[in-house]
Image (cartoon, rainbow, N blue to C red):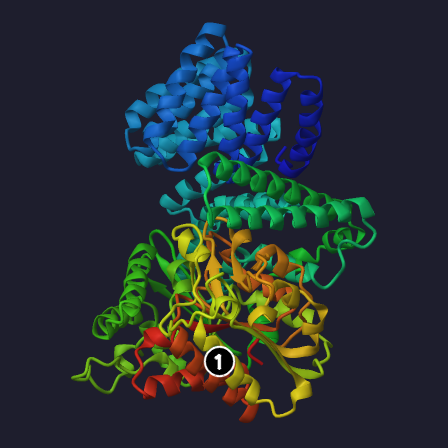
Amino acid sequence: MGEKQKALAYYNQALPLHRAVSDKDGEATTLSNIGTIYSDLGDGQKALTYYNQALLLRRAVGDKGGEATTLNNIGKVYSDLQEKLNPVTYYNQALPLYRAVGDKDREATTLSNIGKVYSDLGEKQKALAYYNQALPLHRAVGNKDGEATTLNNIGKVYSDLGDRQKALAYFNQALPQLRDVGDKGGEAHTLSNIAFDERKQGNLKQALTKIKEAIAIIEDLRTKITNQELRTTYFSTVQGYYNFYIDLLMQLHKKDPSIGYNAQALHVSERSRARVLLELLTEANVDIRQGVDSKLVENERSLQQQLSAAEFQRFKLLQGQYTNKQLDNIKQLSESLESQLDDVQAQIRVKSPEYATLTQSKKFDKLVLTLPQIQQLVLDDNTLLLEYSLGEEHSFLWAVSKKSITSYELPKGADIEAAAQTFKKELLDKNDSAATKVGMKLSQMILAPVASQLGQKRLLIVGDGALQTIPFSVLPMPQESQNSALSSKGKFLIPLLMQHEIVTLPSASSIGVLRNKLMGRKLAPKTIAVLADPVFSKDDERLKNIPQLLHDQSRGSELDNQIDECLNLNRLDNTKREAEDILSLEPNPTKSFSALGFAASVTTAVKPDLSQYQIVHFATHGCVSVKNPQFSKLVLSQFDEKGEKIDGNLNLNAIYNLKLPVELVTLSACKTGLGKNVQGEGLVGLTRGFMYAGAKRVVVSLWSVNDLTTASLMHIFYQKMLQEHQNPVAAMRAAQLDMWNSGKAPYYWAAFTIQGEWQ
C-alpha cells in the first residue's frame, strides 16, 4: 500500500521472534522483506545487507523457492544501482530454481526483470521477448500487480521505440489494475509514463494533468515515512518526476508566457529540494520528545552513545594493529546501531504529540514557498534570487527579484556539470589562467542570460548538482560585463565577488523556515567563543616537547577515500594564531571564551555554556564522509592533559544534539560545506547539523583549505565584523576582496562561503 515505514515497523517486531524460536525460514523471509523495503526506498546497499543474510539462511534450510526469490531481489538491487552486468547473473540463477519448484508467478517476475535489464541496455526486441513470456504466466496465476507491471514495462519499450499509441494502450491497461490492487508507487510510475508520451504527441495539457496526479501520490507516500534518512532516499528516487514536471511547465511557458507557468515551475523546483531539511528546522522549533515514553527517549540517547563509542573504537583500532575481521565486526556493529537508532527516532516521531500536531495541521505541507511568498518573505529590494535546475535535456534558471520573475533555458545539465567540475579542478590546481578560461565558459552558460539584471545586488544562489560545490564568488562576470581581456599575468577577469555579496542556500524556502525558527529570539549576551589548535597526536610537542613546524598543512580530508589522513592528523600551528588574533578583537575579556589545545575538546563543544555567545568559531581539522554523512565530523582534541586517549570526534549526530542559538558558526576547516550529494536534498553534511542546533548562519569551506592563509583570511573577516560592525556576509566579501587585491590565488580564500540568513 506504499506505507513502507509501517511495514518496516512490523517486520522489525517479527524478526527477533523468529530468531527466538529458531525459525530460520521465517527469519529469512523477514530479512528479505526488510531488504525489499530498503530497496524500494532507494537504499540499495542496506537492502543488499539484508538480502545476503537471507540468502545464507535460505540455502541452509534448502528452500529453493526462497533462495530464488532472494537471488531475484539481489539482481533487482544491482539493476537499480546501474550495475548492468551483475543483475542477469542473479536472475539466471533464480530462473531454474523457480521452474524446479513450479512457481510460475515468480518465474514471470524474474523474466520481467531480465527484460528490464535488456531494455535499459537498449536491446528492446530482446526485452519484449522476455516481457511477452512473463505476461501469460502472471495472468495464469491471477497476479494483477505483476501483470500490470509487465504491461507497463512493455508500454515503456514501445515508447522508447517511438510507437506512442501502442505505448499508451499498454499504460492504460496497466493503470486500472494497479489502482485495483492499491499499488500506489506503480500507479505514480505509470501516470508519469503516460504523461511522457502525451507530451511527445504534443498533448501538453493532458501530460500536465497526469504528472500532477503522479506527484500528488509521491507527496502522499513521502509523508508516511517517518524515518528521515529513508524519507530522503525515497525522495531521491523520484526526482525524475519533478524534473519532468518542471520541463513540461517551462515548455508550456514558452508557448504562452502570460499564464505564469514559469512561476509554477519555480514552485515545483522548491518542492523538489531540501524537504527533509525544512522539516528538521521546523521540528527544531518544538520538542518532539515531549510526551513520548521516557524509555524510548532513553533508548535513543543510549544508542547515540553506543554509536559514538563504536566509532571511537574503530578510530583507535585503525591507529594500531588490527585484522580485517576486527574491522568488519566494528563496521557491522556501527551499521546495526545506526539502523536501530533510525528506527527508534522514527518511533519517537510516530508517538510524539508535538510531531502529530505538525503533521495533522499540515504544517509540513506549507513549508514550501510560492513565488509571491518568496518575494514577500525572503527578498528585499537589493537582493536577487538565482535558482538553478539541471536537467537531462534542458536546464533552467529563475531570476527572482522583489517584484519580478524571469526564467531562462540553459544548456543540458551534463554540460554545465562538466564545466563546473573542471572549473573547480583548475582552482584546486592553482591554475588561474585555465580556471579563468573554463570559468568564463561556465559563466556564459549560467550567468550571461541574466547579466542585465545583476547590477550590484546581493545574490542568493540556489545551486543544483555540481553548482553546489563551486565558489560563485570567483566566477568571472559574464563576457559582456567585462571591460578588459585576460591580463598578461593570467589573473582572473572581474570576479562576481567584485560587485556582489553572495549567499548560498539549499532552497529559497529554507530562509522562510529559518526566519520563522529565529522569530523573537534574543541576542546572546556575550560575543565570541573559539575552539582551536586541538591535540591530535601522541607525538604533539605539548605532550612530548618535540618541536614541529607544519605551517603548510591543510585542515582535513575525506573519510571514505583517504581514511589514513583523518587518523594521523598533524597539528595546525596557525590555528592558535588565528584564535588569538580573533580573540584580541573583542576588548572585553568577559565577553569572549577560548578553548585552545587540550581544552578544545568534545566535552567543551557540547557544554551548554557556548549558547551564551553570539559567535562560535572552530579552527581544526574537518573530515567529511560522502557515503555516510552521520560520520562527518570536526576533529577536536584526541588526548587529555595526562596523555590519555579521548574521543575527539564531534560527529554529525552529536552536532544535531547541540543547543546553539547563535548568530554565526564558523567552521574554519576543510570541506565543511560538502557532504553526501543526495538528489532532491542537496549536500547532506555538517551545515544542516549546525542549523538544526540553532545557528542563524554557518561559514563553511568547499575544499581542503590552507592552514596559513586561512588564518589570515579569518583575521580580516573578524576584524570587519567585530571592529567595523559589518554583517557576516558583507565582512566575508570584504575579507576575500582584500585577499584578491593582495594577489593571492583564489585557491587560498575562495573556498569559504556563507549559508543561511544574510540579514
| Quadrant, the N terminus | top right
Residue drawn at (72%, 43%), measured in percent from left and top?
A: 347
Residue 194 in the figure: left or right of residue 294: left
**Residue 643 appears at what percent x and percent y?**
57, 62
Residue under label 1:
578
**Residue 349 appears at what percent x and percent y?**
72, 48
Residue drawn at (50%, 78%), measured in percent from left and top?
A: 576
Residue drawn at (46%, 86%), measured in percent from left and top?
A: 716
Residue 558 in the figure: left or right of residue 326: left
The answer to whether residue 382 is seen in the rendering is: no
The answer to whether residue 33 is seen in the rendering is: yes
**Residue 599 appears at what percent x and percent y?**
61, 70
Task: Judge whether 736 appears above or below 362 on screen.
Answer: below
Crowd rating for badge 1 (residues with CA inside 10 Å; few <14, some 14–19, many 20+): many
Q: Secondary structure at mark 1?
A: helix
| Quadrant, the C terminus | bottom right
Residue nearest the viewer, comparing 505 with 31: 31
